[in-house]
Image (spheres, rainbow, N blue to C red):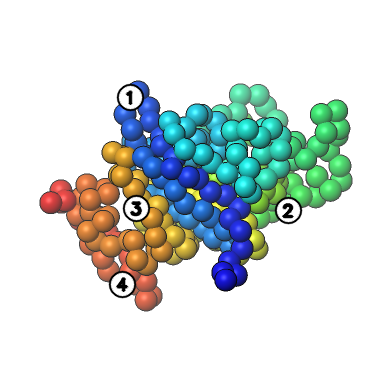
Amino acid sequence: MSTSPDPLFSCHDLSVAVAGRTLVEGLSFAVRPGELLAILGQNGSGKTLTMHTLAGLRPAAGGQVHLQGRDVSASRRQDTARRLALLPQHVDDIFPATVLDTAMIGRHPHIGRFGWESAEDVAVTQAALAAVDLDELAQRDVLTLSGGERRRLAIAQVLTQQPQVYLLDEPTTHLDPQHQIDALRLFRRQADDGAAVVASLHDVNLAVRFADRCLLLYGDGRWDIGATGEVLDEARLSELFATRMEALVWRNLRLFVASGDVAP
């Protein structure tokens, strides 16, 4: 008898399509507490649309998505938001607000319709800002932040939500190399503490360093999934990115470099 914990999040026979084109067909996977699953693929392969479909923001072309055994499409949005957080690829700030107030938006699923933020909500938010090194900017106007600072604020916002499942669409966008590492370390810790994390990435080597498993989306309906050390190889990645990918060893890790040559 298996002793593995029940999945926090799963999809079954999921298909994702846009404008009559099927990007993902028959996708099935489950993510358990403690797991970080990376999604890799070219631009236009369906990573963002798949993320939005998994989050219940757009209808699937087929199949089902389950959050702790419940169909996401049939659940109340607030109930889903207490357990699942989506970090979009792009976040727009239209109105001025402080960094603290913007981060605290993540607490709204836990607050009643006519309720106010409690001291605990403020403390959770301050801790999230500290985790992304923005605590000293708490009273700054969000419209004065750089692109990288705004991305870290978006990460803080999903942390304040305290979900059990994180769906992260390109979490390292706009971040410099150190903050990219810091962000992935942060979500690796969330997984190690019992959350389930699904993150789409452009950098295959970040997936090598932090992901337990990888999902490869080829953009024509096909997909591969497996343990990171098994599913990431030169042949698959060269086909996935349509450029020759060559492996090298660094600190006992097999990393990959794009040669710039068209893959055969």
Q: CA distance from mark 2 to mark 1?
A: 45 Å
Q: Position of residue 165 (x, y in %)?
A: 61, 49
Q: Badge 1 is on which residue?
A: 20
Q: Earlier in the sequence, mark 2 or mark 1?
A: 1
Q: Which mark is residue 249?
A: 4
Foreground mark, 2 or 1, reads: 1
Toward the viewer: 78 or 105? 78
Q: Badge 3 is on which residue?
A: 224
Q: Badge 2 is on which residue?
A: 127
Q: Position of residue 239 (x, y in %)?
A: 23, 50
Q: Amino acid at mark 1?
A: Gly
Badges 2 and 3: C-beta atoms under 8 Å apart?
no
Name the residue rendered at 28%, 62% in the picture. Answer: 233
Helix, strand or loop at label 4? It is: strand
**Quadrant of residue 131 within the rendered picture:** bottom right
Foreground mark, 2 or 3, reads: 3
For residue 155, say whether it is visible: no
Q: Position of residue 246 (x, y in %)?
A: 23, 62
Toward the viewer: 98 or 29? 29
Q: Amino acid at mark 3?
A: Asp
Helix, strand or loop at label 3? It is: strand
Q: CA distance from mark 3 to mark 1?
A: 22 Å
Toward the viewer: 223 or 108? 223
Q: CA distance from mark 4 to mark 3?
A: 23 Å
Name the residue rendered at 44%, 40% in the picture. Answer: 14
Helix, strand or loop at label 2? It is: helix
Q: CA distance from mark 4 to mark 2?
A: 37 Å
Q: Residues within 10 Å of mark 1 (few under 14, many from 20)?
A: few
Q: Earlier in the sequence, mark 2 or mark 3?
A: 2
